[in-house]
Image (cartoon, rainbow, N blue to C red):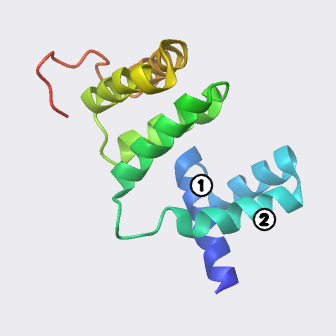
Amino acid sequence: MGTERRERGVAAYASQFGVSEDEVERLFLERFGRRFAEEAFHAAGDAWRDDALSLRDRSLLVLAVLAAQGGVESRLRTHVRWALEHGATAAELDALASLLAVYAGFPRASVALEAFREELRLAGVDPNPPKDAEG
């Protein structure tokens, strides 16, 4: 069970970062060391695997948490790309940032929205959803 969970975690990070599983392991070992890497792989092994929430919903929740934390823009950006892969739309990201402004504050929400919009542009997605877009 532990080996399977670890493998699912490595696969999740590889998908998130858009690299091979071997590459993600190497990156984690270089950046964080063995202990942290192993904890991250095992934690991610089940975090993205549950029928109660879709991958899209999970991605939007993670974006909200990272935006509310502030100071983690590089992590936020990788999750924007992953949210798009999971089916999130520009309109949903726009709405998310507007809601976060009320609950997390305008400074953090505006930084997140700048990251959202830049990543949308890089992905070839118009960051300006129509005013009446519902997602």
Q: Is residue 87 above or below residue 44?
A: above
- Secondary element at tag 2: helix
Tell me the residue at 87%/61% (across/down): 35
Split into 4 quadrants, where in the image is the C terminus? top left
Q: Is residue 97 left or right of residue 1?
A: left
Mark 2 or mark 1: which comes first in sequence?
1
- Along the viewing direction, whichever of 84 and 63 lies nearer the viewer: 63
Instruction: Report helix, strand or loop for mark 1.
Output: helix
| Residue at 60% in and 55% down | 13
User: In this orientation, which residue lies closer to the viewer: 131 or 69?
Assistant: 69
Does the image show residue 19?
yes
Task: Indicate the amino acid at tag 2.
Answer: Glu
Tell me the mark number nearer the camera, choosing from 2 and 1.
Answer: 2
Q: Position of residue 86 (x, y in %)?
A: 36, 49
Which label was assigned to residue 14? Answer: 1
Residue 79 locus on image (x, y percent): 51, 40
Residue 93 lies, in percent from the top left, at 35, 29
Residue at the farthest left position: 132
Name which quarter of the figure residue 126 lies in: top left
Dot 1: few (<14), some (14–19), or many (≥20) neighbours within 10 Å? some
Q: Quadrant of the N terminus?
A: bottom right
* 116 to 4, vertically: above or below: above
Q: Residues within 10 Å of mark 2 (few under 14, many from 20)?
A: some
User: In the rendered image, is residue 18 in sight?
Assistant: no
Task: Name the quadrant containing residue 66.
Answer: top right
> Which residue matches tag 2?
38
Q: Residue at x 68, y 68 (%)?
A: 42
Examine the rendered structure and indicate whether residue 59 appears above or below residue 102: below
Where residue 10 appears, as percent x and y from the top left, is: 64, 63
